[in-house]
Image: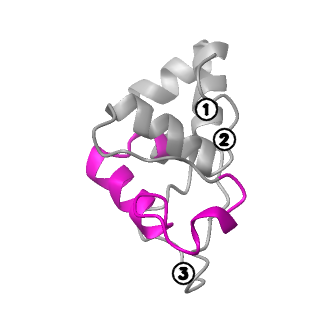
């Protein structure tokens, strides 16, 4: 039987478009020092929006952005990180770091 979301998607073009948007895959970023990908790196745009504060902190640390090191500025879009940022600010910074459009610093 059809689910609520599939029935709604069938009748609502905007909802269908949003579901397609959230399913967009994200290219993994590798850690420069090891070549590994963080185990919680978001595989889709939806997974990015579901990251918790602890996961954002872990990503920043894993990719040398929380604690500066010789690797910090070798990433394509290095960021300045502070653990006292709000969840929204952390998400925006990680979004910028991994190359998502619309995550630039507010003007």
Indicate the secondary structure of the residue bearing disc 2.
loop
Give the side of residue 107 with respect to residue 1, left or right: right
Helix, strand or loop at mark 1: loop
Horizontally, residue 4 falls left or right of residue 41, namely left
Residue at image coords 50%, 29%: 6
Query: Where is the N terminus found, in terms of image quarters?
Result: top left
Report if residue 59 lies within the magenta region.
yes
Q: Residues within 10 Å of mark 2 (few under 14, many from 20)?
A: some
- The residue where tag 1 is placed is 103
Q: Relative to residue 4, is residue 7 drawn left or right?
A: right
Quadrant where the C terminus sits is: top right
Do the CB atoms of the residues marked 1 and 2 lie less than 8 Å apart?
A: yes
The quarter of the displayed image where residue 16 is located: top right
Nearest the eye: 104 or 1: 104
Q: Is residue 64 left or right of residue 20?
A: left
Residue 77, given in percent of the width and then of the height, sits at 68, 52
Identify residue for label 3: 36
Marks 1 and 2, how far apart at CA = 6 Å
Residue 48 seen in the current view: yes
Report the residue marked by disc 2. Answer: 100
What's the magenta region? Answer: 48-77
């Amino acid at each position: 039987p059809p689910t609520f979301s599939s029935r709604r998607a069938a009748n609502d073009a905007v909802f269908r478009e949003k579901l397609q948007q959230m399913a967009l895959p994200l290219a993994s970023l590798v850690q420069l020092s090891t070549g590994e990908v963080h185990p919680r790196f978001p595989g889709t745009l939806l997974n990015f929006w579901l990251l918790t504060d602890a996961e954002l902190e872990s990503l920043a640390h894993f990719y040398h952005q929380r604690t500066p090191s010789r690797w910090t500025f070798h990433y394509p879009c290095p960021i300045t990180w502070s653990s006292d940022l709000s969840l929204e600010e952390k998400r925006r910074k990680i979004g910028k770091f991994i190359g998502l459009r619309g995550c630039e610093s507010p003007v």
